[in-house]
Amino acid sequence: MTDFRNGMRADAIDSACAGPWIKAKISEGQGQCAEAKDLPGSRVAVRQSTDPTGPALIFTRDEFAAFLTGAKAGEFDHLGAIV
């Protein structure tokens, strides 16, 4: 198993782990979004779609689930607000 770590190049994850990067359908054609990828060991990688070779953040599945639960509950809505 590869030693996946925060800040590693996202393309290094591609060469070590099969499967697609997934992004929200709503962002199709806009060119700006985060993408997530399932990793071995119950982990999830997240990268910026406009920088596919840039750094990735690595989360445990529990950490990622907690973030998604908070996002669904609107806890981060203020971060996407247009001012």
Image (tube, helix red, strand yellow):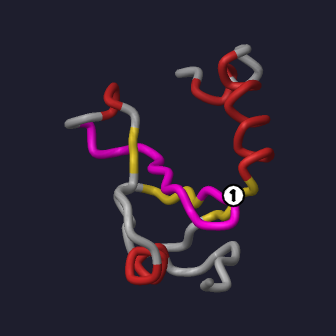
Q: Position of residue 47 (x, y in %)?
A: 50, 59
Q: Residue at x 32, y 29 (%)?
A: 25
Quarter placement of the C terminus: top right
Q: Splitting the image into 4 quarters, where does residue 2 fall?
A: bottom right
Observer-nearest of 60 and 55? 60
Q: Position of residue 69 (x, y in %)?
A: 73, 25
Residue 14 as seen in the image, left or right of residue 75 = left
Circle 1: residue type: Ser
Q: Which residues are magenta?
A: 30-44
Residue 38 as seen in the image, left or right of residue 24 = right
Q: Position of residue 23 (x, y in %)?
A: 39, 42
Q: Residue at x 77, y 21 (%)?
A: 75
Observer-nearest of 32 and 59? 59
Q: Is residue 42 magenta?
A: yes
Observer-nearest of 18 and 48? 18
Compared to 18, does 31 lie above or below?
Answer: above
Q: Splitting the image into 4 quarters, where does residue 65 fall?
A: top right
Q: How many marks?
A: 1
Q: Position of residue 3 (x, y in %)?
A: 67, 84
Q: Residue at x 48, y 76 (%)?
A: 13
Q: Is residue 40 magenta?
A: yes
Residue lying furthest left? 29
Quarter placement of the N terminus: bottom right
**Secondary structure found at label 1:** loop
Observer-nearest of 79 and 29? 29
Q: Splitting the image into 4 quarters, where does residue 30 fall?
A: top left
Structural crowding at the residue carrying mark 1, measured as other residues with C-alpha within 10 Å and reported as few (<14), some (14–19) or many (≥20): few
Q: Which residue is mark 1?
A: 42
